[in-house]
Amino acid sequence: MLAEMAFFSFVELTDPTTHGAYNRWHQLDHRPENLALPGVAWGDRWARTGKETEPVRGTAVDGTDYVAMYWFRPPVEESVAAWDRLGEASFQWGRGPIIPGVRRPLLGFFRPVKGYAAPRVLVDPDVLPYRPNRGLHLTLTRYPEPHGRDAHDAFAWEDTRLIPELLGVDGVAGAWTFSFSHPQQHGTLPFKGSVSAPPGGLRVRMLYLDEDPGPTAEAVTQAEQAVNAAPEAPRNTGEVLFASPLQTIIPWQDW
């Protein structure tokens, strides 16, 4: 497996005039510093477009504008500790991450569950994060009983029926699933209002896309609805907190 731990950050900018400055900071300062750490296997971020047209779910992550994630090499404790030290150093340098107008509704560590690659892309699932992509389709689901029978049945259906079907959708290159481990705890970031859950209580499904994320996401939704309409499909599949296409950020062009 590529890594033993991953980190997800959901970000909302409450001031629409700050997108350019925030993207420059993240793409040209914050992310390069993180990627240079030996314990970080890879990290990337994506922008949410067209959220005004998507259904409002009434969740804390509804307003998300950006999603970032990092993969950590073992030993995870040492890798994350070095990452935290960089965060503290960045604060002491006056280079973030405390930025006006930035709200972070989810900051959490997740354990990678399983990777999948569409046969046409040839590469192993561990290579997918390094393969260029045009964006993601990302789903965040909450399970009230993360180790109950309903969750177990939902995970089995996702693994054996749903994801194999989604891999056949044009533009879907592969997928990874993640199970919530614990929230981030760091002295330089405010955590008030961050979504949390018991271990396993949140699950992320990431579909890597190599076609236009908008139309591909629509095809993904249609395929998912068709699969889940089967008589044998589980009915208690958790509460979807977030389901949206995300677009790869092209430096300078997209800000």
Image (cartoon, grey):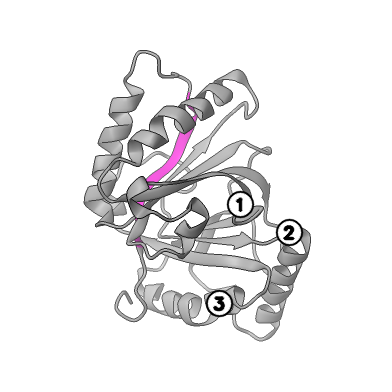
Residue at 65 percent of width and 65 percent of height: 189
Report how far apart the C-alphas of labels 3 and 1 lie in the structure.
26 Å
Does 241 appear in magenta? Answer: yes
Q: Is residue 137 left or right of residue 102?
A: left
Q: Which residue is mark 3?
A: 30
- Of all residues, the one furthest to the left in this rendering is 215
The mark closer to the camera, 3 or 1, is 1
Q: Which residue is mark 1?
A: 1
Magenta segment, which residues? 237-247
Instruction: Kindly report the secondary structure that dominates the magenta region of the rendered protein.
Output: strand
Instruction: Tell me if mark 3 has few (under 14), some (14-19) or many (20+) residues whose alpha carbon lies within 10 angstroms of its own.
Output: some
Up-down: is 157 above or below 250? Answer: above
Instruction: Tell me if mark 1 has few (under 14), some (14-19) or many (20+) residues whose alpha carbon lies within 10 angstroms of its own.
Output: few
Report how far apart the C-alphas of labels 1 and 2 lie in the structure.
13 Å
Residue at 28 percent of width and 34 percent of height: 223
- Of all residues, the one furthest to the bottom in this rendering is 93
Residue at 61 percent of width and 36 percent of height: 201
Secondary structure of the residue carrying numbered label 2: helix
- Of all residues, the one furthest to the top in this rendering is 231
Q: Position of residue 255 (x, y in %)?
A: 33, 77
Q: Amino acid at mark 1?
A: Met
- Between discs 3 and 1, the one toward the N terminus: 1
Q: Which residue is mark 2?
A: 76
Q: Position of residue 219 (x, y in %)?
A: 24, 41
- Between discs 1 and 2, the one toward the N terminus: 1
